[in-house]
């Protein structure tokens, strides 16, 4: 794709890429970086394959968040509450877009970041740890912060790196925490907002994709991750 085309597409998405002059100058690079930041990619200003894939996804029109209100709908409980119990939207729901992908996805696998209870870590922290392992990007597709915010990780259109032998066909989600404050013992450290957001995210993904199974990393490996049994959790009752 030409630089001019890139400039036009970024501008159309609301990024200040400058005039479509075909010159990859500071404005264009800044716009690429702003876009990468917004979609949770590595911010390097280079429009590589991951950035181009995310750009294509961002250009796909979002489905309306809720149907047009009408009398019958208003008389009924909101479907997500009725169907999913405590699946309340996360605090950053207005800025969160769950992207579509043609990649076949039939399972959601939950993880924890294996970080101590009570401590916050960002997508960029986790990305740095995973890149230290030699991975191209963060291994998870979604990360749920302690305050309930849901952050995009690796674009869902790309195969993740979260469960050996089960990355194809799955979405990897992780909550921040999973270990006691001393950093040694596996512990279900999910906060109330995290539980609510995990339910909400799982419910949204289950609606968007043909999800047949919701599982935890510990069902596939001799690990504690995500420090609880998804099969006995309300998460597994969403299907
Ligand atoms: Zn895991």
Image: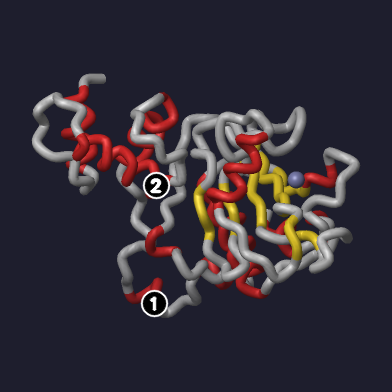
Q: Which quadrant of the rendered structure holds the C terminus?
A: bottom right
SS at badge 2: helix
- Say which quarter of the image contains residue 26: top left
Q: Residue furthest top?
A: 1
Residue that mark 1 sits on:
74
Viewer-closest of 106 and 198: 198
- Say which quarter of the image contains residue 211: top right
Viewer-closest of 52 and 104: 52
Which residue appears at 53% of the width and 49% of the height? Answer: 124
Does residue 170 appear to the left or right of 38 in the view shown?
right
Q: Do tag 1 and tag 2 residues touch (Cβ < 8 Å)?
A: no
Residue 37: assigned label: 2
**Rendered position, 77 above or below 190:** below
Q: Residue 84: x percent and y percent?
A: 61, 66
SS at badge 1: helix
Q: Residue 161: x percent and y percent?
A: 66, 34
């Amino acid at each position: 794709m030409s630089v001019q085309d890139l400039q036009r597409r970024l501008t159309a998405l609301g990024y200040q890429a400058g005039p479509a002059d075909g010159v990859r100058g500071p404005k264009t690079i800044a716009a690429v970086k702003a876009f990468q930041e917004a979609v949770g990619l590595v911010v390097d200003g280079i429009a590589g394959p991951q950035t181009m894939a995310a750009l294509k996804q961002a250009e796909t029109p979002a489905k309306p968040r809720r149907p047009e209100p009408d009398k019958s709908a208003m008389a009924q409980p909101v479907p997500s509450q009725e169907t999913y119990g405590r699946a309340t939207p996360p605090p950053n729901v207005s800025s969160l877009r769950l992207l579509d992908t043609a990649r076949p996805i039939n399972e959601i696998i939950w993880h924890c970041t294996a970080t101590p209870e009570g401590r916050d870590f960002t997508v960029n922290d986790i990305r740095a740890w995973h890149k230290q392992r030699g991975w191209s990007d963060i291994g998870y597709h979604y990360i749920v912060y302690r305050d309930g915010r849901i952050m995009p990780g690796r674009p869902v259109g790309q195969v993740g790196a979260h469960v050996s032998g089960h990355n194809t066909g799955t979405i990897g989600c992780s909550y921040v925490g999973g270990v006691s404050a001393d950093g040694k013992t596996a512990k279900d450290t999910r906060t109330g907002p995290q539980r609510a957001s995990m339910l909400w995210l799982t419910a949204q993904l289950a609606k968007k994709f043909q999800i047949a199974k919701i599982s935890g990393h510990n069902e596939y490996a001799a690990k504690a991750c995500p420090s609880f049994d998804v099969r006995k959790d309300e998460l597994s009752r969403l299907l």
